Image (cartoon, grey):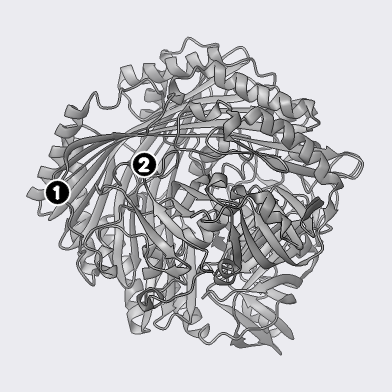
Amino acid sequence: MKRKDFLYLSGMSFGAAMLNRIPVLGSPVPYDVITPGADVAAKKRMADVVLNTAKSKGATYADVRIGRYLNQYVITREDKVQNVVNTESYGMGIRVIANGSWGFAATSDMTTDGIAAATNLAVQIAKENSRLLKEPVQLAPQKGYGEVSWKTPIEVNAFEVPIKDKIDLLLGVNNAAMTNGASYVDSAMFTVNEQKYFASTDGSYIDQDIHRLWPVFNVTKIDSKTGKFETRNSLGSPVGMGYEYLTPKASEKIQSQTTLYRNRYDMMEDAKLAAIQAGEKHKAKSVEAGKYDLVLDPTNLYLTIHESAGHPSELDRVLGYEANFAGTSFLTLDKWKSGKFNYGSKLVNIKADKLQPGSLGYVGYDDEGVKCGEWDIIKDGTLVNYQAIRDQAHIIGLKESQGCCYAESWDNVQFQRMANISLQPGKAPLAPAELIKNVEKGIYIIGDGSYSIDQQRYNFQFSGQLFYEIKNGQIAGMLKDVAYQSNTQEFWNSCSAICDERDYRLGGTFFDGKGQPPQSNAVSHGSSTARFNGVNVINTSRKI
Amino acid sequence: MAILSQEEAQALMKKALSFSKADECEINLNGSDSGNIRYARNSVSTSGAISQTSLVVSSAFGKKLGVATINEYDDASLEKAVRRSEELAQLAPENPEYVPFLGPQTYSADNPKLFDQKTAEMEPKKRTDMVAQSLQVAKDANLTAAGFLQNTGSFAAMMNSHGLFAYNKYSDINFSVTLRSADGKGSGYASRDYEDFNDMDTLKLTKVAAQKANGSVTAKAIEPGKYTVILEPAAGIVLLENLYGALDARSADEGRSFLSKAGGGTKLGEKLVDERVNIYSDPQDPRLPTASWNGDGRPLERVNWIEKGVIKNLSYSRFWAQKKGVKAVPGPSGIIMEGGDASLEDLIKGTEKGILVTRLWYIRPVDPQTLLYTGLTRDGTFYIENGQIKFPVKNFRFNESPVIMLNNLEALGRTERTVSGESFQSAMIPPMKIRDFTFSSLSDAV
């Protein structure tokens, strides 16, 4: 293990799996540093140094992202605060086209000389790489927007909430779990603010202030006699919202086998229920492997949507740009061109939407200066579109980009990343309880668990947090050791019912990984509870 | 600015420490300069150069800790970061598990293989030349290449108010390539990671990927089930790292690990896997040089983790070691699993019926209790009969535990350096022949 990797993880002893690859101590800083927008004039001056230098060195296109990335982590376990971290990282990423090839350089040396040197390096790299180029980069036209700005609509800026309030909440959550029978509990709050200034030779100067929040816990219950342990993770979501997400509201709760949450999260209540349910899991029946009709709650289905609909419809994967890492896609261009490729049942409508309020992918403009929007990916079960950026749009006959470009930080090059991809709710009135009534032999699954899918997105396996057996339309008790395996096309064609919009909720992740060097993208996926017939379920218990 | 010398790092950290008003203060400083080329569809795609640094300030008042990081280094910014960490510490409640920062430590001399100046400072042209060689192989073989080459120079340093100072400098070159047949029916992969670019042969590695791509076309579907498998090192590492990366004492003591025992206690000192399994880490090994200290300043030394199948050591946080009254052994760095004398070809020759797995991918935990993991084969999977590779087979999903796998060990080949496609960490791993490996379904993916 190299030093950089150690530093990556050393800051937290908190559930490493949950925090896979979060740059804990790596890049980020303090939150009071800057009032977004206040130094726009200075940023414009720096951006113009890049754009003018690039043009004078022979670049035909240039863009620059000046970013200040602020993160805050509060990490606790049981009655202890393990760490309180503020991170700040400031720098710029410069991207150019010269001799028809892309070049990129990132620097934190923000002096005029430093900026010019980095710009020169980006142009030098582009020219050098043009030796390896088959076809020059073709950018979809993009009008300049002039000087514009955008901000995540938040009610309460989480960075302005006193640390003490966050600590009190997390220790309260832990106490709720411990007093209800948990053996251990970890909890954390991650607060993110991206202050991004984008400028390009197209004439855009875009200032954006983006906020995200992720409260999370993990409860463990140990049975010391058997030596077994069971866990139950939180059912809240990472959101593109302010601290208001953490003010519980009765109207945003959905009562099921456990309480589920829409736009407000009652973390304390969820922790109490988690502790009780972790205890129940010890007594649950081990599932009998076989075919079941699955009823998937949005807290579970969002991840299946992410992996089996979000990734395969990314145009860079379809074209082969991710062949060496994340993989390619079974949704090949010929299937899209046919206009008839049957992705799922007629009920299945999947949309890309960069403008969904409260979602992680909600921004005004993407990281190459394209105004964001929404579009269909799967219409009535048929593949109709992909997710594209400026240098790919012409390949699928688009006259403009769909605005899917994103870079994790100023020191990463921007590339095609997933928009919010969501399953549209059913049109006929249907509530989860009514849906369950019609299931003869099934499993109702809540929460996300283990997940894995192949590099072309055919074969997948997912688990969950809570599993309930359905027998003749009734919940018959809790199950454990459940994972479902399917093929994407078969699975979506087995979709036989989707609840209506009253049940629609967003799930999401901070850590959608892709690219080399790898980058994370935060993205949400909405759905209502849905039914999938005859899905293969395996039993995951083993003896060692 | 990104690569600071020992003296420069020392001066900057001293300056930062001078602003401290806390009971204890510790500074971690790191930086890197890297350059990369990404290519796909037989053409360059994105590429670039990245220069970055980060300074981490940890301040403590009694048992209250606060941390702040910054990447601006004028006096005002340094002072701001120190003050911010102090404010956070004052706002934090006392942590009963807080352990004061370490005093001065003695570290082994840096492994001389850890840093190569030329690798750290490679020019864009050198990267382009190395990728051009790879692309030529693809062109000659009528295959489509996608790959990634990156060189990095980096440093890490730390200093604290008790007089501890540590510094290491690293270089790294990383290369991976996937070749696919024009009809999309065959795919092959190769990857390596070294400290010295002279060790990196992009031409040879791309030829290996080409051979696998051509060899995996027209794969046949065979029934999933339990098979004898030969895992090439690139396949084995992604399962094994979830075993040697999980040798944590506290979770085992707390009863929430595959190393916990019913009624309490752990499996430390007990035989867990086949007696031919020996796994250790050694920062001084020339084959896999690693840092001489870890992130909290503890010296990194050779540690035997599994010896003759017995768990010999678990890693401890400083708090947990203090509580248990044992040595605070830091987690593994630079893992070496001993192998035998057999080559991969020898292992194939000695196999009556089995499957050669060249790569495993998308590995995720299914059950931490048994260390059960799932994932898939990828980029070349082959059926072996009577000591020969007979034909390529379609990819499988597996559900398997590295603990069960190492109990079903049939044979080990010669250990070699490989890099994980999941964690990007390198290790020395032998090819392994394993019986009863569980494939649970077929995948149509190529």
Q: Which chain carries label 1?
A: A
| Residue type pointed to by label 1 | Asp
Q: Work out which residue is located at the far front of the displayed protein and give it.
A: A429
> Residue B59's x, y, as percent?
52, 18
Q: Report the Cα–Cα distance between label 1 and label 2.
A: 22 Å
Q: Which of marks 2 and 1 precedes in the sequence?
A: 1
Residue A282 against residue A444 in the figure, above or below: above
Label 1: few (<14), some (14–19) or many (≥20) C-alpha neighbours in 10 Å: some
Q: Can residue B108 be seen in this view?
A: no
Q: Is A249 situated left or right of B318 in this image?
A: left
Same chain for labels 1 and 2? Say yes or no: yes
**Can you identify the residue that label 1 sits on?**
A202
> Residue B371's x, y, as percent?
73, 54
What is the secondary structure assignment of the residue under circle 1? Answer: loop
What is the secondary structure assignment of the residue under circle 2? Answer: loop
Q: Work out which residue is located at the far left of the displayed protein and give it.
A: A56
Q: Which mark is residue A409?
A: 2
Q: Can you say which quadrant of the picture contains the N terminus of chain B?
A: top left
Q: Which chain carries label 2?
A: A
Q: Total label count?
A: 2
Q: Is A307 situated left or right of A207 in this image?
A: right
Residue A292 against residue A173 in the figure, above or below: below
- Closer to the camera in the image, A85 or A211: A211
Residue at 66%, 48% in the rendered image: B245
| Residue type pointed to by label 2 | Ser
